[in-house]
Image (tube, rainbow, N blue to C red):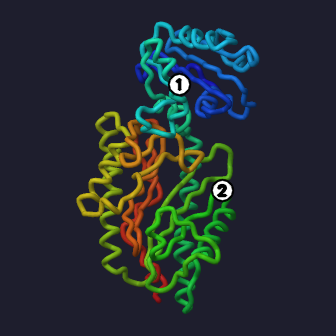
Amino acid sequence: MFDLSAVRRSLAEFGLDGWLLYDFRGSNVLARRVLGLEGRPVGSRRFFYFIPTTGEPRKLVHRIEAGALDELPGEKTVYLPWQQLESGVAALIRGCRRVAMEYSPRVSNPYVSRVDAGVIELVRSTGVEVVSSGDLVQQFEATWDDGQWAMHREADGFTRSAFALAFGLIADRVHAGGTIRETEVQSAIMDHFHRNGLTTYSPPIVAVGPHSGDPHYEPVAGKDGVIGRDDFVLIDLWAKMDRPRSVYSDLTKVGYVGETVPSKYQEIFAVVAAARDAAIACVKQAYAAGRPLPGWEVDAACRAVIDRAGHGDHFIHRTGHNIGQEVHGNGAHMDNLETHEERLVLRRTCFSIEPGIYTEEFGVRSEVNVFVDGEGTVHVTGGLQSEVQPILRARGS
């Protein structure tokens, strides 16, 4: 539901004169969500909706679809020829200096870039500065309420217990003198989710040996790996409660099918864990100091640890992604590799911290989730793995 008062508060917070929302044939899903239009039929003509920090909103709609924004507050202007469109845009933002749009400079953030360059050129031709609406979008797309935070914690209990189930299943099979396929472990995790009322958009990653060196490996029946004694195993899983507005828990842990873990695995894990903890510390220190924290700084703090250890070339993805109703949400990512993420780590948002080091022989990743609550307290869910799990130790085999 569109909340005009909340948008105005956010505009004032970020020092903007207004937010110019634009859509053509559903090209700007973010604008449609903010305006409460998601799920409604998509029109065939362009519309603009301007929300000033003070004063009433203003609409610009095509004559054929003059009622497209009638359920939203504000005065309406109807255009027909392209000249009226251009003059209408100028009238919407007259008197403004800085307005936000779904745009990111220099292709810095493809998650936000929903407005084409031609529209940006038109707006700039009026003398108005266009800035990214990335942090505004976060306020309405990525923040959690108390109910969602509670559902995340509930899901976290089941995702964490899925690792105990998976590692236990591997241990039982190997203890009996056998092996187990990656897809068998994957199926057991999915059954665990279904029994406990969770849902997910895709099955988890279960990766043995060299497969763990591929961050996006997907086991496929008939082509999947076999897990046996003395194998290294990575499990990455994600799920949420099967309820409206639920949000994901997304975790990764690693184990070794033996009683004692060889040093080559433990040494790499120690670097990854130190990088993970440096990223978490970066978030906590920024909030304790009350200073704004862009996502790129979290990535930089994490990546510096791995770089110093001489494994920078083996850390081939961002430190983390926003988490919401989709496992990869629309809030700030912890990224200074694939993009220079300047969006801020806002209160009531959640994201993963998941550094990894990947080689042809094996890959190590340690993933937890971080949620900053409304008071600025930083919560870590998923459990901080302190060592590579010796999968057979508990079974005494």
Corner quadrant of residue 119: top right
Q: Which residue sits at x=46%, y=87%?
A: 396
- Label 1: which secondary element: helix
Q: Which amino acid type is marked by label 1?
A: Gly
Q: Which residue sits at x=68%, y=52%?
A: 242
Left or right: 345 with respect to 201? left
Left or right: 343 with respect to 42? left
Report if residue 57 is visible in the image: no
Q: Which residue sits at x=40%, y=45%?
A: 378
Horizontal and vertical percent for residue 162?
56, 67
248 to 95, vertically: above or below = below
Q: Which mark is residue 310?
A: none
Horizontal and vertical percent for residue 308?
23, 59
User: In this orientation, which residue lies closer to the viewer: 385 or 154?
Assistant: 385
Horizontal and vertical percent for residue 51?
55, 17
Q: Quadrant of the N terminus?
A: top right
Q: Which mark is residue 118?
A: 1
Work out which residue is located at the far bottom of the displayed protein and give it.
Answer: 177
Q: Which residue sits at x=45%, y=81%?
A: 231
> How many numbered marks are there?
2
Corner quadrant of residue 71: top right
The residue labelled by disc 2 is 199
Q: Which amino acid type is marked by label 2?
A: Thr
Give the CA separation, mark 1 to mark 2: 41 Å
Q: Residues within 10 Å of mark 1 (few under 14, many from 20)?
A: few
- Label 2: which secondary element: strand
Horizontal and vertical percent for residue 260?
37, 83
